[in-house]
Amino acid sequence: MMKEWETLCTAGNDCFHQCRWTQAKRHYLSALVIVEALYTASPDNDSLMLAWLVTHHNLASLYKKTGETDEQINHLTTPFITLRDKLRTTPPSDKSYPTILHALTKCKFELTTNMQGEQPDDLSYEHNSVPSAKPGDTIH
């Protein structure tokens, strides 16, 4: 199923770069359905968490381009709230803690830059481009 998610995200990114918004949206939403089902079934899987985050952020970038502010905000705040709550219930000694912290930091960055209007024009990114969290990472 992750291969299908990756294929859909890649197709969505291709459409995004070609300004084919409707097709990009269809690919990203289909990818989100897949990754949400997988992440719900395996909430402790760090790779699925990051894939879920990437998909939400790709959709937020798309909705910014199309002027759909409410949808953009939804795809920025949903992961932020979910990961914030997950971090609060995860002990720092848990092996997933650094990854959750990194993902939450990424969410905070996306929210901040989007709300200040400083987001680069093209923020869609691939799952593999999300760097790994390191022990000691903190939210500023």
Image (cartoon, rainbow, N blue to C red):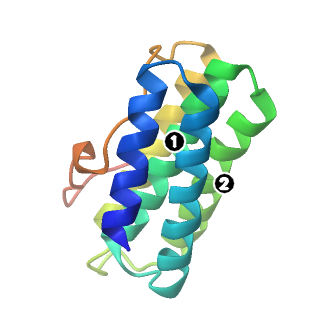
| Quadrant assignment for the C terminus | top left
Quarter of the picture holding the N terminus? bottom left
Task: Answer with the quarter of the image where residue 125 lies.
Answer: top left
Residue 110, horizontal then vertical, whole percent: 51, 33
Q: Residues within 10 Å of mark 2 (few under 14, many from 20)?
A: some
**Position of 119 compared to 128: left or right?**
right
| Residue type beneath disc 1 | His
**Nearest to the observer: residue 27 or residue 108:** 27
Q: Percent position (x, y) of residue 59?
A: 58, 40
Q: Secondary structure at mark 1?
A: helix
- Return the residue nearer the eye: 77 or 28: 28
Residue 30 located left or right of residue 126: right
Q: Relative to residue 117, is residue 115 depicted above or below? A: below
Determine whether, in the image, residue 58 is placed left or right of residue 92: right
Are there few (<14), some (14-19), or many (20+) residues within 10 Å of tag 1?
many
Residue at 23% x, 56% y is 136
The numbered mark at residue 78 is 2
Disc 2 residue type? Thr
Residue at left offset 76%, top offset 27%? 68
One can see residue 124 in this view: no
Q: Residue furthest right?
A: 70
Is 50 placed left or right of 117 in the picture? left
**Quarter assignment of residue 76:** top right
Residue carrying label 1 = 57
Q: Secondary structure at mark 2?
A: helix
* Residue plotted at (21% across, 54% down): 132
Q: Residue at x 38, y 64 (%)?
A: 4
Which of the two marks, 2 or 1, is nearer to us in this view? 1
**Mark 2 or mark 1: whose residue is earlier in sequence:** 1
Look at the image and tell me whether residue 54 can be seen. Answer: yes
